[in-house]
Amino acid sequence: MVDQVVVSSIGKTLHIRMNRPEKKNALTRAMYYALADAVERADADPAVRVIAITGTGDAFTSGNDLADFIDRQSSSNAERPAMHFLATIAKAKKPLLAGVNGLAVGIGVTMLLHCDLVYAATEATFALPFINLGLVPEAASSLLLPQMIGYHRAAELFFLGNRFDAQTAREIGLVNAVHPKEALDAAVQEVATALAAKPPASLRMIKELLKGQAFDAAVAARFEQETTVFERQLQSPEAREAVEAILQKRTPDFSQFN
């Protein structure tokens, strides 16, 4: 079996690639742990100066694996590998780049808020469909996204859960630039190479200053707040109806809820 998280190096850049294209890179527990481990190792490795994350095929990641989501919904186990991964990238000290090669859904978007530079393929699409699953945002995105793009735009994306394209993502400031898909990897590597040539301590300190201690504390507090509400909603009738509708291939009916 081909590894579902592939790690490789180009110069001083560590590339982490989600590699489950047959499932649009839907993330399993094992993949979350592998991603977090790769980021942690890179952040501690003096030979690595830049970390880059991308996907395989026509998806960056379609979000959480449905089987894992259903199992998680029926489990009392509070462990969430996704939160471990998100906390890991939020705390990364080295520059973290993302190359969004295609579909990015849920955590495929919220993780971008913790990356320092984000580049997207022309064909990439984005969605934050938590509302459609009877859930709430994660990864401190309810704090970070309004700060990044403004309250009204963030509310529209969270309230409606609709898809939006790469150009829209660039216009609202979610991504730095858009490239043809065939040129995306090279564009990300070009920026990574430029960053790797900069003074590494200075680069780390600039990142630390940009985020700041107050920012880090606010993000940690929002992580905890969102997780508490997310866990409660995960067991809610609304979330059960959403999952049943997916399994039954029908439109969910939320009219019965207040």
Image: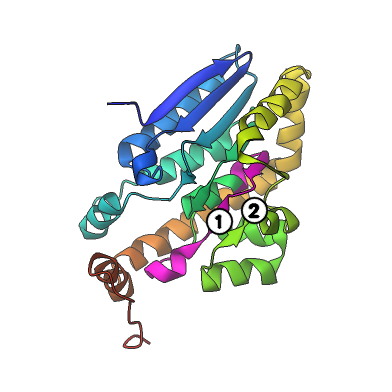
Is 117 located above or below residue 152 in the figure? above
Which amino acid, by three-letter code, is at mark 1? Phe
> Which residue is at 25% across, 57% downward?
70
On the picture, is 251 further left or further right than 87?
left
Most foreground residue, 256 or 235: 256
- Disc 2 to disc 1: CB gap under 8 Å: yes
Could you tell me which quadrant the N terminus lies in? top left
On the picture, is 171 further left or further right than 237?
right
Q: Secondary structure at mark 1?
A: strand
Task: Find residue 98 and report its horizontal and vertical position in percent.
Answer: 60, 37
Residues rendered magenta in the picture: 113-136
> Which residue is at 54% across, 51% downward?
110
User: What is the number of the mark on residue 126?
Assistant: 1
On the picture, is 162 further left or further right than 148?
left
Crowdedness near tag 1: few (<14), some (14–19) or many (≥20) residues, C-alpha within 10 Å: many
Q: Choose top left, top right, bottom left or bottom right for residue 150.
A: bottom right
Q: Is residue 119 magenta?
A: yes
Task: Find residue 256 and report its horizontal and vertical position in percent.
Answer: 31, 88
Q: Is residue 44 magenta?
A: no
* Residue 229 in view here: yes
> Which residue is at 66% across, 27% downward?
186
Colour theme:
rainbow
Is 40 located above or below residue 207 in the figure? above
Query: What residue is pinned by disc 2?
Result: 166
Most foreground residue, 12 or 201: 12
